[in-house]
Image (cartoon, rainbow, N blue to C red):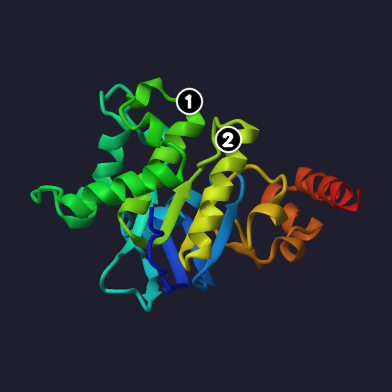
Amino acid sequence: MNPIPDGGASMSLQDVTVEFDGQMALSNVSFDVEAGTLMGVVGPNGAGKSTLFNAIAGLLPVRRGKVTLHRVDQGRGALAYVPQRESVNWRFPVTVKDVAMMGRCCRLGWCRRPGKRDRELVDACLYRVGLWDHRSALMTELSGGQRQRVFVARALTQEASVLLLDEAFSGVDAGAQEGLVEVLQTVRNEGRIVLLATHDLTNLAGRFDQVLCLNRRVCACGPPDEVFTSEVMEQLYGAPGVRLAMAGEGSKSR
């Protein structure tokens, strides 16, 4: 199985502001992401993580500011989005391979019949996420971690330069989380940008190159060891955030 070609795109957000019914959901969000970066997006419920991803994907209107993708290879897609599990209809009877092939349909258009290269690419993506042996299984038969890997495979079949994963660790056990991180790290190593929203603050430094701390605005953005401070955690979570930061410092010192 040949690896997917390198990406090379970078992304920047400048003063991105989103409102719902007059209420500020995101306020002046600005940050840059270079090619070959795995970024964690953390923050409390209601912080705007899903809103941020929807704005980047163009699914929500931006009141002010802009999202820019630089140096996107014209031969590949710009962006692939893996939404929260709660937004998926699990009762729909489709196989693992069917879901992965949907990524090609999104990339090339639903009216185009998949060709040999499309089928080979789907097989390659299922193989790399460890689900080739489950390609004929129904999605309803899979564990939470396996389902998430199917959606990662679907995103990979789109050959996108930027991957957005919204709460990909939700309902997934620790072992499956680490397996998913390993897959995403290989994607990062190919020059892609991967943004993963998560509530799990454990082992941030081991998982992510950069962390965006979001609470409707950017509280901090940078390497995990630099942004995971008591001040930033308090901005995110209030007083309990300070205890989280202190616990994290204690675990690093052991």
Q: Residue at x 54, y 43 (%)?
A: 180
Residue 155 at x, y = what percent?
36, 50
| Labels 1 and 2: the sequence-earlier one | 1
Residue topped by disc 2: 176
Q: Is residue 147 above or below residue 207?
A: above
Q: Residue at x 34, y 25 (%)?
A: 137
Towards the viewer: 182 or 116:
116
Q: Is residue 190 in view from this perspective?
A: yes
Residue 67: image quadrant is bottom left
Q: How many marks?
A: 2
Residue 227: image quadrant is bottom right
Estimate the spatial distance between the alpha carbons at disc 1 and disc 2, rounded to whole Å: 10 Å
Residue topped by disc 1: 143
Q: Amino acid at mark 1?
A: Ser
Position of residue 109 in the picture relative to residue 31 (left or right): left
Q: Is residue 48 in view from this perspective?
A: no
Q: Residue at x 31, y 28 (%)?
A: 89
